[in-house]
Amino acid sequence: MPSIRRRPARWVATLAASAVALVGCTTGPSTTPAASPTATTSDQVVRMAVVGDSITDADSPDLANGDLGAQSWVAHAVDDEVAFAGGWAEWGARTAQMADAIAAPFDADVLVILAGTNDALGDDLAADVGAQLVRIVERAGVDEVVVSSIPPLASAPDRSDAVNDFLEPFVAQQGWTWVDASAGLRDGDGFVAGTSYDGVHLTEAGAGLLGAAIRTAVVDAAP
């Protein structure tokens, strides 16, 4: 079961691990960096905004406007309790690019960030990932923040581990919610069979596992 750590107070403060991973993250569909559409939901539905890279965008024709692909974890996190409230994700995006791309606050109850894969080879995770996550949260304007672990990098498992080892205590320090949503994807130094098609990106089955874990964290974090 993925571990979830709740934020204790109501305040807010994805690299490829190798050339193979980097190339894998720089081709494919992308989204337009725009403010999120307003979701029309009841008070009981949690409005979820997302920020990420190719793991989030995946095969989505237009993630920003809710046209989600089956290999995007977002498609598996949305149900009768969680509504997609917009977001930004692009293949190859580093965490700083995500922060730069947010043009306006999101109208959402919970913000989910899955970032760090494309920064994993860097030597300064505090600057490349940590400081940029703070910028994302500030620009997104959503009080409740969930940060997920990144999936494995089959060609450089030590680097994905390094990102997650940095993220968990950093997220706790910021008072956000940490979820090791990628736990169900890991098998030793790589992926559980059938959850990745290239050692970086997720199959529909892998996206389903990741999305289900993130969905649980979003529901728990909702105000």
Image: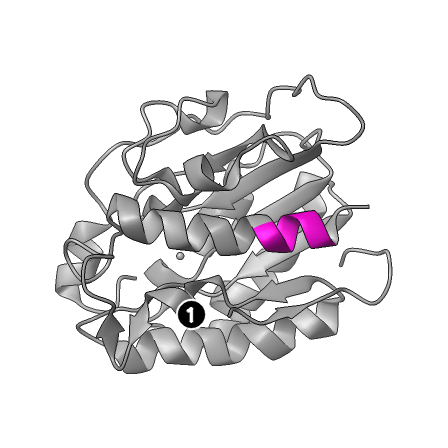
Question: Is residue 135 visible in this depiction of the protein?
Answer: no
| Magenta region | 216-220
Q: Is residue 3 left or right of residue 186?
A: right
Q: Residue at 59% x, 25% y: name it.
A: 35
Residue 113 rendering spot, x and y as whole percentages: 54, 51
Q: Is residue 59 left or right of residue 208?
A: left
Residue 30 rendering spot, x and y as whole percentages: 32, 32
Q: Look at label 1 and name its amino acid.
A: Ala
Does the stretch in magenta take in 3?
A: no
Q: Residue at 75% x, 46% y: name it.
A: 222
Residue 180 rendering spot, x and y as whole percentages: 51, 68
Q: Could you tell me how many numbered marks the image carries?
A: 1
Residue 36 rendering spot, x and y as whole percentages: 59, 25
Disc 1 crowd rating (10 Å Cα; few below 14, some 14-19, many 20+) is many
Taking 26 as reference, is 129 above or below it? Answer: below
Q: Residue at 73% x, 67% y: name it.
A: 174
| Quadrant in the picture for residue 133 | bottom right
